[in-house]
Image: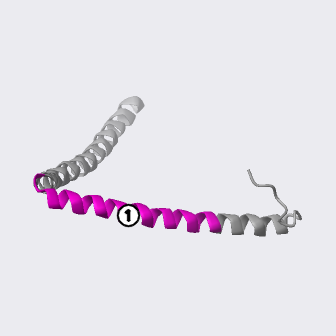
Amino acid sequence: MGNRDGFTSGFFLGATLGGLVGGVLGVVLANRISNQDRVEPLLEAQGKSGKATKLTGENMETSRLGLEDKIAQLNQAIDDVRQQLGSVNGNGGSETEN
């Protein structure tokens, strides 16, 4: 009898958790599919006119340049921290660069 009681509670617990996980997964996937349906017509409309495509290319170039600036800032910050840690560890910041 003890096994039956454990089976019943485990069965209901598994069904409940499975239902919750399945429900959450369904909502997430439905939202992604819905968002793709909204974005694709916009991309098709921009692709038909040459002006929209040109603006997109210019925006991509501007974004690329902005990202290069951010990367340079991050590299500088990493170098600064590396020098500070070298001073703390007794290296005195006399590391060799790779």
Does residue 71 appear to the left or right of 11 in the view shown?
right
Q: Main secondary structure of the magenta part?
A: helix
Start-end of magenta stretch: 48-76
Q: Secondary structure at mark 1?
A: helix
Residue at figure coordinates x 15%, y 52% from the top left:
47
Position of 12 relative to 40 (above/below): above
- The percent coordinates of residue 95 (x first, y second) are 82, 58
Residue at figure coordinates x 57%, y 68% from the top left:
73
Question: Based on the displayed image, in which of its 4 quarters is residue 15 positioned?
Answer: top left
Q: Nearer the viewer, residue 61 or 76?
A: 61
Does residue 44 appear to the left or right of 71 in the view shown?
left
Q: Is residue 58 magenta?
A: yes
Q: Is residue 23 magenta?
A: no
Q: Residues within 10 Å of mark 1 (few under 14, many from 20)?
A: few
Q: Nearer the viewer, residue 93 or 28?
A: 93
Q: Nearer the viewer, residue 71 or 7?
A: 71
- The percent coordinates of residue 7 (x first, y second) are 36, 33
- The percent coordinates of residue 71 (x first, y second) are 53, 62
Q: Nearer the viewer, residue 41 or 32?
A: 41
- Extreme-right residue of the structure: 90
Question: Based on the displayed image, in which of its 4 quarters is residue 83 positioned?
Answer: bottom right
Does residue 70 appear to the left or right of 28 in the view shown?
right
The image quadrant where one finds the N terminus is top left
Colour setup of the view: one colour
Q: Amino acid at mark 1?
A: Ser
Question: Based on the displayed image, in which of its 4 quarters is residue 17 positioned?
Answer: top left
Position of 43 relative to 59 (above/below): above
Give the number of marks: 1
Q: Which residue position holds label 1?
A: 63
Residue at figure coordinates x 41%, y 32% from the top left:
2
- The percent coordinates of residue 6 (x first, y second) are 39, 35
Does residue 37 appear to the left or right of 18 in the view shown?
left
